[in-house]
Image (tube, helix red, strand yellow):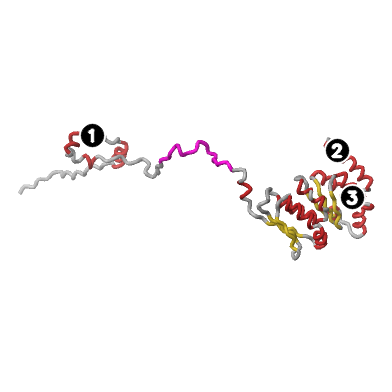
Amino acid sequence: MVVVTGQSTPPQQPARKNRRKESKKKTTAAPADIVVDSDNEDDGEDTNPTASTSAHPPPAADDDELMIDIDPSATPLSSAPAFAPLSADAGKSTLKSETRRIAIPPHRMTPLKKEWINVFGPLTEILGLQVRMNVQRRCVEARTSKATKDVGALQKGADFVKAFALGFDVNDAIALLRLDDLYLDSFEIKDVKTLHGDHLSRAIGRIAGQDGKTKFTIENASRTRIVLADTKIHIMGSFQNIKVARDAIVSLILGSPPGKVYAGLRTVSSRMRQRAF
């Protein structure tokens, strides 16, 4: 019995393939062009049966992106929106009916009833509003109608009725409907200086003057209208004229003598005349 001894060779292990390198090669390699024989197309036979299985179309680079075809003729040339021009009567017919209610103090209800014809006449003829007097609620109600042409007609009508409720004459309040640069300004004596008792009465007397002389002088010099309602003072006029009248009244409240106030009003009125010319 013969025993042969020798070095046993270890079994050879299969070589490991580098899968990362192979995957990179597959992605970087360009797809092979497939050539189709015309003769084979005519015969309808496929000479290379493995061509259909081995050759695959390359994967799309941007599969996640959604491609949308846009008609270049449909896109506008500029980014600004284009709207069709409106007709001249387009803005008049689209106005919605609005209502305004103006409260009337109890002591002005009797003058309102006496002057009602002169009050609602300009509102209906000039502004084209529908107006009625609510006696139970003590207010004047106005609303727009088809005859209303101006957008700010309701606000002008409310200012006109409010001016009459504050104590202005109807003929003076109509100027608010005809002119655009007229305003109302109201303040109290205690806003300027805190006065009580006889001091408050004397301040009101200085503003009014004997038989209303001082008040009329301020009105004529500043081209405004002034109403003294107890401790409240209401002024109607343009912005610049209201400032002139208010400064004169404030000076009288603080105790300035009327002669000094008259001198200041003469200077201001002369400057206003020069600007007018």
**Residue sitting nearer the eye, 28 or 178:** 178
Asked if the magenta segment contains residue 272, the reply would be: no
**Residue type at the position of mark 1:** Val
Q: Quadrant of residue 58?
A: top left
Q: Mark 3 points at which residue?
A: 215
Label 2, label 3: how far apart the Cα atoms are: 20 Å
Q: In this view, does 67 lie to the left or right of 178?
A: left
Tell me the SS state at disc 3.
Answer: helix
The label number, if any, that marks residue 272 in the structure image = none
Q: Residue furthest bottom?
A: 136
Q: Mark 2 points at which residue?
A: 273
**Residue sitting nearer the eye, 231 or 110:** 110
Give the extent of the magenta segment: 69-86
Residue for point 81% across, 49% down: 236
Q: Mark 1 points at which residue?
A: 35
Query: Is disc 2 surrounded by few (<14), some (14 to 19) or many (20+) residues within 10 Å?
Result: few
**Residue type at the position of mark 2:** Arg
Q: Residue furthest left?
A: 1
